[in-house]
């Protein structure tokens, strides 16, 4: 049976393993499966990577990422320079349409515009996470899709059943007000992400009602 001390040890080991290229100023607080990250890092990528590392650890149920990005003086960039780099990266990504807009204020990137699929919105954020000189990303992209098919529940159920990472006996899909809704318990963040992906993948989905919890079964 795991306890907070053991979980904190595992979390710190995994974060250290992920960010092994140099010293870090990251502290962790753990209580009942809930993990909070505090401290500072030099890049936004490190902030994102630290959170991903925590989610990989067994028995983690929630993560609060309170890390601050403090960019070293020699790595500071002008907002216009960051914006141009961001637009170039997005334009060269074959998954993304030309309808995404970028605004940068004080090294903070805001994405807006429209896409047809949720995965495109997520991809836009992912592809900019490693951009030098940024302190954060805000995603205001709007998903504009065709109407969800009335029988969309069946293909979502099928996607959950055939996914090796998802226990479809514990995660169930419904349609609520014409949009997918997921309920149940995921054993890990990886299972949660796979279940959400199955729901978002249904053509016409513009939102997913998320009632999943992450916990040990």
Image: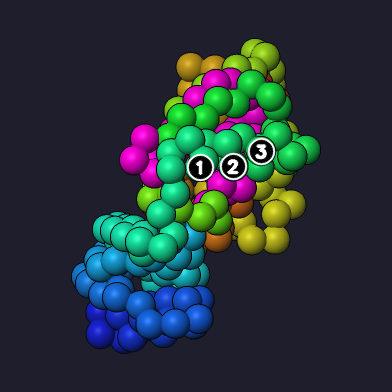
In the rendered image, is residue 9 in sight? yes
Is 113 one of the magenta-colored residues? yes
| Stretch of the chain drawn in magenta | 105-129
Identify the coloring. rainbow
What is the tally of numbered marks visible in this picture? 3
Quadrant occupied by the N terminus: bottom left
Residues at circles 3 and 1 in contact by the CB criterion of under 8 Å: no
Q: Quadrant of residue 100?
A: top right
Give the residue pinned by disc 3: 88
Labelled pair 3, 2 in contact (Cβ < 8 Å)? yes
- Above or below, 211 relative to 142: below
Which x, y percent locates residue 200?
61, 35
Residue under circle 1?
Answer: 82
| Disc sitting over residue 85 in the figure | 2
For residue 215: magenta?
no
Q: Is residue 156 left or right of residue 64?
A: right
Query: Is residue 47 something one can see in this rendering?
Result: no
Residue at x-position 55% and y-position 21%: 113
Callout 3: few (<14), some (14-19), or many (20+) C-alpha neighbours within 10 Å?
few
Q: Nearer the viewer, residue 27 or 79?
A: 79
Determine whether 39 is above or below 156 in the image: below
Give the residue at x 44% y 82%: 22
Q: Considering only order in the chain, which callout, 1 or 3, is on the residue closer to the N terminus?
A: 1
| Horizontal side of residue 168 vs 10, given as left or right | right
User: Callout 2: 10 Å neighbours few (<14), some, many (20+)?
Assistant: some
Out of 42 and 137, give the one closest to the viewer: 42
Element under disc 3? helix
Residue under the point 50% across and 25% down: 112
Q: CA distance from mark 2 to mark 1?
A: 5 Å
- Judging depth in this view, the residue of 60 and 140 nearest the camera is 140
Q: Position of residue 61 (x, y in %)?
A: 36, 62
């Amino acid at each position: 049976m795991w306890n907070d001390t053991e979980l904190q040890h595992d979390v710190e080991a995994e974060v250290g393993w992920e960010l092994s290229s140099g010293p870090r100023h990251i502290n962790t607080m753990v209580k009942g499966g809930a993990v909070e990250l505090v401290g500072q890092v030099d890049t936004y990528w490190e902030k994102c990577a630290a959170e991903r590392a925590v989610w990989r650890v067994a028995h983690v149920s929630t993560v609060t990422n309170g890390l601050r990005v403090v960019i070293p003086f020699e790595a500071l960039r002008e907002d216009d320079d960051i914006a141009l780099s961001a637009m170039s990266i997005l334009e060269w990504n074959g998954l993304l349409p030309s309808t995404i807009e970028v605004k940068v204020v004080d090294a903070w990137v805001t994405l807006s515009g429209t896409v047809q699929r949720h995965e495109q919105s997520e991809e836009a954020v992912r592809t900019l996470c490693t951009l030098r000189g940024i302190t954060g990303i805000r995603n205001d992209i709007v998903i504009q899709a065709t109407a969800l098919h009335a029988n969309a529940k069946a293909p979502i159920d099928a996607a959950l059943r055939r996914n090796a990472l998802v226990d479809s006996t514990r995660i169930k899909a419904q349609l609520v007000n014409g949009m997918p809704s997921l309920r149940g318990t995921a054993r890990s963040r990886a299972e949660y992400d796979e279940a959400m992906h199955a729901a978002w993948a249904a053509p016409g989905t513009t939102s997913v009602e998320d009632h999943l919890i992450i916990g040990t079964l």
